[in-house]
Image (cartoon, rainbow, N blue to C red):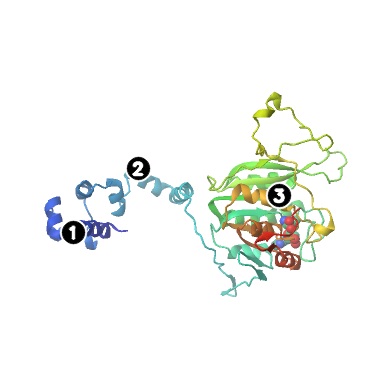
Amino acid sequence: MSFGTRLKELRRQRNLSLRELGGKLQVDHAYLSRLETGSVFPSEKVIRQIARTFKLSVEELSLAAGKLPNDVATIFYEHPKEAAFLLRERFAVYNTTVQLKGKKENGHRQELEPIFQTRRGQLYQCDCLEFLPTVPDGSADLVFADPPFNLRKNYGQLVDDDLQEEKYLQWSYQWLEELCRILKPGGSLFVYNLPKWNIHFAALLARSLTFRHWIAINIKTTLPIPGRLYPSHYSLLYFTKGKPRVFNRPRVPIPSCRHCGGDIKDYGGHRKWLNPAGLNLTDVWDDIPPVRHQKYKSRAANELSVKLLQRVLEIASEKEDLVFDPFGGGGTTYYAAELMERRWLGCEIEDCKPIIERLSGNLFTNGKLTTATC
Ligand SMILES: C[S@@+](CC[C@H](N)C(=O)[O-])C[C@H]1O[C@@H](n2cnc3c(N)ncnc32)[C@H](O)[C@@H]1O
């Protein structure tokens, strides 16, 4: 609200005429009228008098009059982008709606049409590098990306999962940059990949985001590599855009022996003091099951456990937040988002039928989850 409008509002709240207020402030009523219409700027002395009369802070009125404290103005002049960014981040000011921008073709905007949508989400069948530029800046509360790992897997004809290392990194840097752009201040970004690739990704992400964790997801199913240590974890990078807006630390059950049922650790004799709700989650997750059996797979190649996505969403999002995943696969992220009442948005370059079938299935009966999660 401008200074003039604020002044008029204050005067009217007290039922004062221009003359009466002029008398209190010891200024001419015609000058007051010009202040209210914005045709003159108030001096610092007048701002102080008005603040005293209406018991307001000088800072608030000065800001309404467009005057920043000198030191703050200097920060803004010298660092216009960073200063605005830091403020938005500190006070978690972000856009709340997503309206796809529509890609440009031959100079004309062309709307992309979703191939499938629910009340909470939209799926697009296209290359993420085509889709991402249509997503506005700062629109996603949580981004999760599980790209092909360049392990020569067959995802379909449109995906080459056997690129030269340089090419794979170059391709990845493109979508990573876009993901940083679409993340809201305070939002969280997770990237699931081999440690071999995630060390490069982390270096790139650290330029614009804040590192939180390298989460090791224990895996039991890889093959030994000759001349190397046995690979036993995938990496889940966790970055935020500044201070996280949402951070919940889940508790996990106290691990017990599957043969005798006793505790695996002795907790230095302090077992009875442990929180009955469970242990604090660490950055090594060894309770994530692989989705091995075809019966539970919504798609032939590489589908993650719902438990993994539910945990990620629990840590870094709230109901109605927007979750974005550019590599749909079997739709695990979107499925978890539906279960947890988050909004979602994503794309998949190959066949989207498995996602559509999964999300169109009997997810809920009478408001209760009926499909087994794994
Ligand atoms: C590892 S899978 C993701 C699995 C998914 N997280 C799940 O749990 O179902 C990677 C997916 O990315 C898709 N993909 C590969 N390149 C893509 C691109 N350029 N744009 C969009 N999707 C792509 C592949 O077709 C594959 O389905």
- Determine the secondary structure under disc 2: helix
Tell me if residue 222 can be seen.
yes
Q: Seen in the image, is 223 located left or right of residue 76? A: right
Number of dots carrying numbers? 3
Q: Are marks 1 and 2 in contact (CB under 8 Å)?
A: no
Instruction: Identify residue type, mark 1.
Output: Asn
- Residue annotated with mark 2: 71
- Determine the secondary structure under disc 1: loop
First-in-chain label (3 vs 2): 2
* In-front residue for pair 314/48: 314
- Mark 1 and mark 2: Cα distance apart in space: 37 Å
Q: Position of residue 323 (x, y in %)?
A: 61, 57
Q: Could you say which quadrant of the image residue 267 lies in?
A: top right
- Residue annotated with mark 3: 308
- Vertical arrangement, residue 173 with respect to residue 115, above or below: above
First-in-chain label (1 vs 3): 1
Please tell me whether mark 3 or mark 2 is closer to you in this view: 3
Q: Are marks 3 and 2 in contact (CB under 8 Å)?
A: no
Instruction: Identify residue type, mark 3.
Output: Leu
- Residue annotated with mark 1: 15
- Determine the secondary structure under disc 3: helix
Q: Is mark 2 within 8 Å of ligand 1?
A: no
- Vertical arrangement, residue 267 with respect to residue 372, above or below: above
* In-front residue for pair 261/99: 261
Q: Could you say which quadrant of the image residue 123 lies in?
A: bottom right
Q: Position of residue 93 (x, y in %)?
A: 47, 53
Where's ligand 1: which quadrant? Answer: bottom right
